[in-house]
Amino acid sequence: MRSVLVANRGEIACRVLRACREAGLRAVAVHAEDETGALHTELADISLPLDGSGAPAYLNGEAIIAAALANNVDAIHPGFGFLSERAGFAQAVLDAGLIWVGPSPSAIERMGDKMTARITMREAGVPVIPGEEIQIESTEDEEADLAATLSAVRDASARVGFPLLLKASAGGGGKGMRAVESADELDEAVRGARREAIAAFGDGRVYLERLLRGARHVEVQVLADAHGTTVHLGERECSVQRRHQKVFEEAPCAVVDHKQRQRMGEAAIAAAEAVDYVGAGTVEFLMEEDGTFHFLEMNTRIQVEHPITELVTGVDLVREQLRIAAGEPMTVPNLDMRGHAIEVRIYAEDAANGFLPSIGPLAVFRPPTGPGLRLDTGVREGDEVSPSYDPMLAKLIVHAPSRAEALQRMRRALDDFVILGTTTNVAFLRDLCDLEAVTSATTSTTTLDDAYPNGWSPHPASEAVLALGAVLASARSSRPAGGEAGPAGPSSPFLSLSRRYP
Amino acid sequence: MVEIRADEAVHELHPLPRGDVWEVGGVRVKQQPDGRWSVQHGETTLLAHGTRIGDVLWVHIGGRVHRLEVIEAGAGAAVEEGSFTAPMPGGVLEVLVSTGERVSAGQALLVLEAMKMEHRVTAPYDGTVTAVHVAQGDRVQQGEMLLEVEAEEA
């Protein structure tokens, strides 16, 4: 294996391309027509153009394999999202004679379909969340399928009990998922979840799970090589979620002791071995207050929050992925978790307005620096945040000897993070660091809903803020207008940057 | 005089240039050689980042970012009260109300789809739907008018 194509974009493409170069491999990027010159293309030895713009370009597996074959590529790394959990794509990569940096297509398939995964885990003795799979005979007629699903869900809901979670079997990342408080909300939830799941995954099958309130989301990183070794690398806690998407993650989990870690680690290894897993993967659990844990799902790929595990274990997970894909044994020492790591996800979104995605120029993008900080970013100053892609811009990760110090470091780092031109969630993340549930390590998956029942509001503008605003407004109008676009023109970041930002 | 909107309120400010320093009320503002601004208010001096993009002013000071809007003299209110605009580009999945319908606060008015997620637009107050500008299946741009709701007289 000498050359690896990274079938992705944004920060994870940057992360993997750097790992390839560090491993002495030729790093090959791909880019859509609207991403010529994106950060990830410049980190590669070569970047191959894909037809089309936006996500569809990165989802065209056939074109990506053809580009790989035409450019002497030996292996394809899918990153996360896009094609990473599509068994059909993994199979096509293998059929083309290329190396797939990931688990077998059959492992992806059995874990990717959440209903199949639940059944597989039950058989492997891994505890799953109490619930029920909705098995209906699928027809070509969506109306008939919907009616059959509605009736089966109504029956099953009586056995599962309310509140419950309705989830798409093909789902993930909160898509096709609905919390249902009572029976009268059930029908609308089923319609919405099915519609969203069909749009996103082309598969509207759903299942029910009991809604475990107050539980923590705790997941275990596993690594398995082709020589029969499967290890776990400890846990991450990712309870702090908005719209079922993680925003704040930490390792280790503050309430998991050595014994509990061992129990969960063994369950995670059993889960991986049940599908003959090879590569890096994550087994997600919901953990109740008394330590009881239930299998939620397994992500058969590298995960967004993998850096916190890397910082506390000293293991380069992407490098191990490459090693394992090349058929070598992993080089992971005995588990020794050091200190505490926290990651926050920097999103282009408006936390004060239902976390709606925002767009705009990154006129100023100044990440913090200093000891114990890591920034995994897919953007840099001058880039434009487009509505065509996922709004996650970057991940800010800190590492410190203790949890309290890690939180202090994160507060400082977020204070120093300057992003102007596009609304981001940085101020929201900064407020999270001061939430009682976060400082006392009593977070659960409902922490954000409990903390902000009426939504989050930014800090009001002070006199100093208004004064600088007034100067910015006046300084520009008193300047000769050197061919600037009027207010109606496109908002180029360089209008403001022309003012000698180094 | 400049008018600036911050946190829904409009502030009237009078920045005065004094050499290379601006005085705004009791605040002194001076640009640094690297483009940042020193902002002095009483005993406190903070280094700030600021930029203007169109009518939007971005200020980062004391670890916090603020988005302000310049209100240009003579410009009318950009969006009329009671109207709902698309918060992002996307598709209209479902229109749940029709013209003339009475709605109550928190009621879902329509469902938008963007980035494969559903977002519902809800009524912030009790009122009556006076106009619906979109239909199921329409593509909408950010800022496009979706519908209008007249608030109920208290």
Image (tube, rainbow, N blue to C red):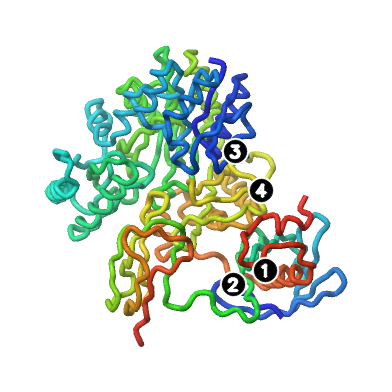
Q: Which residue is mark 4?
A: A381
User: CB of mark 2 within 8 Å of CB of mark 4?
Assistant: no
User: CB of mark 3 within 8 Å of CB of mark 1?
Assistant: no
Residue A465 tag number: 1
Q: Nearer the viewer, residue A327 or A48?
A: A48
User: CB of mark 2 within 8 Å of CB of mark 1?
Assistant: yes
Q: Nearer the viewer, residue A392 or A263?
A: A392
Mark 1 vs 4, N-terminal side: 4
Horizontal side of A349 relative to A295 (left or right) equals right
Q: Which residue is mark 2?
A: B6
Determine the chain carrying the residue at label 2. Answer: B
Residue A401 tag number: 3
On the same chain, marks 3 and 2? The answer is no
Residue type (three-letter) at the residue carrying disc 1: Val
* Residue A375 point in image, percent of width and height: 61, 41
Dividing the picture into quadrants, the one containing residue A228 is top left
